[in-house]
Image (cartoon, rainbow, N blue to C red):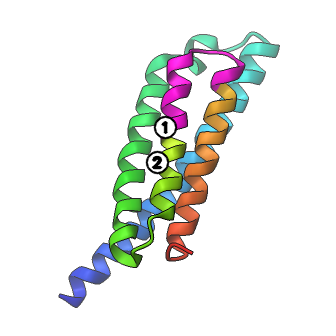
Amino acid sequence: MAFMRTAILALRDRLDRAGIILSGLCAVHCILGVLLVGILGLGGEVLLAPEIHRIGLGLALVVGLVSLGFGVARHGKLAPLVIGGAGLGLMGLALAVGHGPAETVLTIIGVSLVAYAHIRNLHRGG
């Protein structure tokens, strides 16, 4: 039983770290998209492809809900799950508003909240 508990904790920590990395990559993607497409007119067909955004949101949902859910089970604090859920909601809303400044702002705020939630989760919900 102790082995199983240790394995679950290790998985949760890895997923939280993956969530932080994915959030950072998403933020970089958004900023580069705005700069390269908006200012230089480069890469729009790749950087603004809806599939990239849907896949990114899908990954964020899976990683976020699993790792933050494990965190609630581990430390009993809902705050990281609520914060992460709000961030994921903003990321979903960003998909709905379409390309433009609103999408960028919503996504950056959303991924920041998700990353913050994963960091809090790593620190035992503190």
- Give the amino acid at mark 1: Gly
Nearer-the-camera pick, 125 or 5: 125
Location of residue 3 with respect to 60 vertically, above or below: below
State left or right for residue 108 relative to residue 76.
right
Q: Position of residue 50 (x, y in %)?
A: 48, 18
- The numbered disc on residue 40 is none
How busy is the neighbourhood of tag 2: few (under 14 within 10 Å), some, or many (20 plus)? many
Nearer-the-camera pick, 20 or 66: 66
Locate the N terminus and report the quarter of the image it occupies: bottom left
What residue appears at the point 58 percent right and 17 percent down from the top-left corner?
A: 48
Residue annotated with mark 2: 85
What residue appears at the point 59 percent right and 38 percent down from the top-left corner?
A: 26
Locate the C terminus and report the quarter of the image it occupies: bottom right
Q: Position of residue 95 (x, y in %)?
A: 51, 23
Please tell me in which quadrant of the rendered image residue 54 appears.
top left
Location of residue 66 with respect to 46 vertically, above or below: below
* Boundaries of the magenta span: 89-103
In space, the residues marked 1 and 2 are separated at their CA atoms by 6 Å
- Give the amino acid at mark 2: Gly
Please tell me in which quadrant of the rendered image residue 81 appears.
bottom left
Residue annotated with mark 1: 89
What residue appears at the point 78 percent right and 23 percent down from the top-left corner?
A: 35
Marks 1,2: beta carbons within 8 A: yes
Q: Position of residue 53 (x, y in %)?
A: 49, 27
Q: Is residue 19 visible?
A: no
Q: Which secondary structure, mark 2?
A: helix
Residue extending furthest left?
1
